[in-house]
Amino acid sequence: MGFAQQSGYTPLSIETMMLSVMENVNIQFGLEYTVETFLGTNFYKYFYALIQELQVNEIKTSEIFLKLQDYFAVTNERISRPVVTNPGLVEALETAGFIASVKKPIDADAGKVFVAVNVDNLAVDYAAKKLIINTLIKDSTVAGIVSQGTESSTITLTNGQSFDFKYNLPNRLTTLLRLTITTSDNNQVLISSPEDIKELLLENIAESYRLGLNFEPQRYFTVLDAPWAESILLEWSINAGANYYSTVRVANYDDLLEVSLANTTLIES
């Protein structure tokens, strides 16, 4: 079985292994088989079945090595991104079931960490969740880093000292959506109902948009979703429809644009 740094172990072909068998038969018995004369001999028939089983095992071994490579890649990525980094903090919160975003560090924020967590502060169990979140922030940031925000918990460290750990709730922005679809003159497929179109739009947004991300309208509904369309335009408004925009809405770390069926308008032409 061959080995390469990038591709790992490569199973040998049946032809390569049979050639090795032929060479060893020639050496062992003093024969002079060639590839052409060896084919169809009793030696060939006997060893061919064994070689087939051997190749199956080689293939399985190579597959195991590929899975092992994937495991090492994931492990190395986690090692290179420890929990005390911003992505590591977000991952720690997500593992506990909380969608979070962390402000990108700038010089003016040295020694501080700004975290936003998408959690319902009106829920009956919010106090317990707030303590869980702030405990995760405590465990996921290095000493000397001061968390910022309005949602505070006082937590006692192992050395007996007590500190406040904080985060912010999302800046929730009620968002109106306006989707304009122009039907192609060449269309020969069934056009989806308005309800199905709007539901698909919201599903697409839910899959790729979240707290703290830029809102990118050109990504959420395309001709792949509406093959009957000649053109598609998705616009958004966060001022009750006074202004609509189709450009990317650059977000702060705590921004969360909230969309709904009730606030989605479809225009078909």
Image: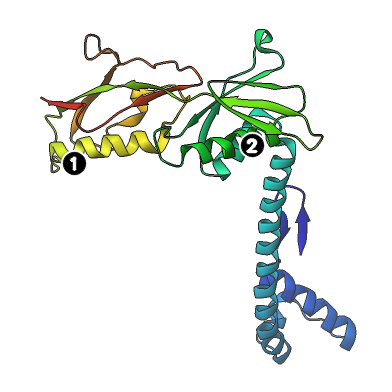
**SS state under label 1:** helix
Dot 1: few (<14), some (14–19), or many (≥20) neighbours within 10 Å?
few
How far across and down, in percent of the image, does residue 256 sit?
A: 41, 24
The image's colouring method is rainbow
Q: Quadrant location of the N terminus? A: bottom right
Amino acid carrying mark 2 in the image: Thr
**Can residue 93 be seen in the rendering of this structure?**
yes
User: Label 2, on which residue?
Assistant: 135
Which residue is painted at 75% across and 34% down in the image? 157
Q: Amino acid at mark 1?
A: Asp
In the rendered structure, which disc, 1 or 2, sits on the residue that comes first in sequence? 2
Horizontal side of residue 20 vs 53, given as left or right: right
SS at mark 2 in the image: helix
Q: Is residue 207 or residue 212 the one in the foreground? A: 212
Give the class, few, some or many, for how many residues have Cα within 10 Å of label 2's Cα (few <14, many ≥20): some
Residue 58: image x %, image y %?
70, 70
Q: Position of residue 44 (x, y in %)?
A: 70, 85
- At x 53%, y 41%, the residue is 128
Mark in the foreground, 1 or 2: 2
For disc 1, the marked residue is 196
Query: Which sits in the foreground, 50 or 202?
Result: 202
Looking at the rendered structure, which numbered label has been put on residue 33? none
- Could you tell whether 162 is left or right of 113 in the image? right
